[in-house]
Amino acid sequence: MTADHIVALAQIMARMQIDNSGKRTTAMRSRVNFNLVRIVPTVLALLNGVFIFLLYRAFRLHLGSQMWIFIYSSILVLIADLCLYGYFIYLTSKTRRLVCEEFNIDHYSCMMYHDEIVSFFLAPFVVAQMGRHTADYDTYVGNFCTKTGLSDHVEVKLPSDEVEYRAMGGVAV
């Protein structure tokens, strides 16, 4: 899991209108949540960087008697990393399930935890596949630093939006 996978997942979640708990929400709320999904890994990466620097300095200064502080700190950082990875897998599997439902993709319901297993072992591929399903990169250029991964003038339309529009008495184009 790298920062670009997290940003790509956050952009897919914004396009699909999914909040940080993995549930459908309004477009505005899902785009506000994009900032949280982007900030948490950045803070954790900085924490890891500071920890590695302090550990390097401790070895250079031969602080053997105080190494227990760094060992306990490394356990806390490892727990934080594992929690973030677990959260990323959770969001990836929930988003994958919602993308499959939205686009009527049969996703092997014969296994109980199929989405979770695929998301755990193949997370970069799952995120890339969801990105291709939720955006037309042949027509629009992808942007890394936008909330949806597309230019700001591009409005994302989902198949369920068209169904809701027809149900309200409108005619879909």
Image (tube, rainbow, N blue to C red):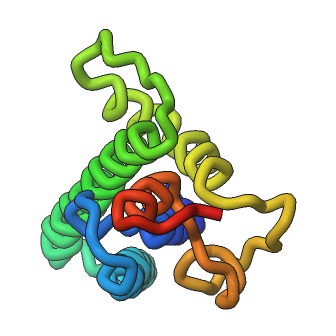
Instruction: Out of 62 and 81, give the one closest to the viewer.
Output: 81
Q: In the orientation shown, which residue stands out farthest toward the top?
A: 110
Instruction: Out of 158 and 35, give the one closest to the viewer.
Output: 158
Residue found at x 72% / y 79%: 143
Q: Quadrant of residue 111?
A: top left
Q: Quadrant of the C terminus?
A: bottom right
Residue found at x 34% / y 23%: 114
Residue found at x 62% / y 48%: 133
Asked if residue 48 shows in the view, the reply is: no
Q: In the orientation shown, which residue stands out farthest toward the right?
A: 138
* Picture coordinates of residue 6, whole percent (x, y): 48, 65
Q: In the orientation shown, which residue stands out farthest toward the front?
A: 169
Q: Quadrant of residue 153?
A: bottom right
* Picture coordinates of residue 18, whole percent (x, y): 33, 65
Q: How many marks?
A: 0
Instruction: Out of 40 and 73, give the one closest to the viewer.
Output: 40
Please state if 90 lies on the left or on the right of 121 as rendered: left
Rendered position, 148 above or below 165: below
Please state if 79 lies on the left or on the right of 173 as rendered: left
Q: Quadrant of residue 160?
A: bottom left
Instruction: Out of 154 and 13, give the one closest to the viewer.
Output: 154
Rendered position, 172 above or below 67: above
* Picture coordinates of residue 9, whole percent (x, y): 48, 62
Rendered position, 80 above or below 97: below
Rendered position, 58 above or below 116: below
Asked if residue 127 shows in the view, the reply is: yes
Residue found at x 74% / y 59%: 136
* Picture coordinates of residue 77, whole percent (x, y): 24, 68
